[in-house]
Amino acid sequence: MAEGHMSLHYAGVDTAISDLEAHAKTMHDQMEDLRSYLASKINVELVGDFSVAAGTLATTLHDADVAMGGKIVNAHNALTEIRGAIKDADMRASTHFDHVQG
């Protein structure tokens, strides 16, 4: 009984991990698309100060993407640890329940 209840908690963490990975991929892809678009316009349609500004924006987007990637890895690791802790608690509770029922 305890196992079924706790499994809902770590199933929720699994969903959070999957959602995090999906959203991270979407954000990364959109960032790359924008950077590619900017790169295609620099020194073609954008010249002079506009070209410099677009290049600066592309660099900023790249830096933000790298930083976001690091934060996502940290969040993924934290969620994985939470899942493990819930699963361990579930197993301990189940073992205790089986021992008490005995």
Image: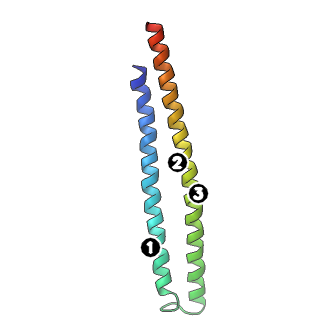
Marks 3 and 1: in contact by CB < 8 Å?
no
The residue shown at (58%, 50%) is 74
Q: Nearer the viewer, mark 1 or mark 3?
A: 3
Amino acid carrying label 1: it is: Asp
Q: Nearer the viewer, mark 1 or mark 2?
A: 2
Which quarter of the rendering shows the N terminus? top left
At which x and y percent is residue 24?
Answer: 47, 58
Q: From the viewer's perspective, is residue 81 above or below residue 91?
A: below
Q: Earlier in the sequence, mark 1 or mark 2?
A: 1
Q: From the viewer's perspective, is residue 43 above or below residue 10?
A: below
The residue shown at (55%, 76%) is 58
The residue shown at (54%, 37%) is 82
- Number of labelled discs? 3
Rate crowding at label 2 as few (under 14), some (14 to 19) or many (20 or more) other CA atoms within 10 Å: some
Residue position marked by numbered label 2 in the rendering = 76
Rate crowding at label 3 as few (under 14), some (14 to 19) or many (20 or more) other CA atoms within 10 Å: few
Residue 70 is marked as: 3
At which x and y percent is residue 87?
Answer: 48, 30
The residue shown at (57%, 88%) is 50
Q: Earlier in the sequence, mark 2 or mark 3?
A: 3
Q: How is the image coloured?
A: rainbow
Residue position marked by numbered label 1 in the rendering = 33
Rate crowding at label 1 as few (under 14), some (14 to 19) or many (20 or more) other CA atoms within 10 Å: few
Residue 55 is marked as: none
Q: Earlier in the sequence, mark 1 or mark 3?
A: 1
Q: From the viewer's perspective, is residue 45 above or below residue 59?
A: below
Amino acid carrying label 3: it is: Gly
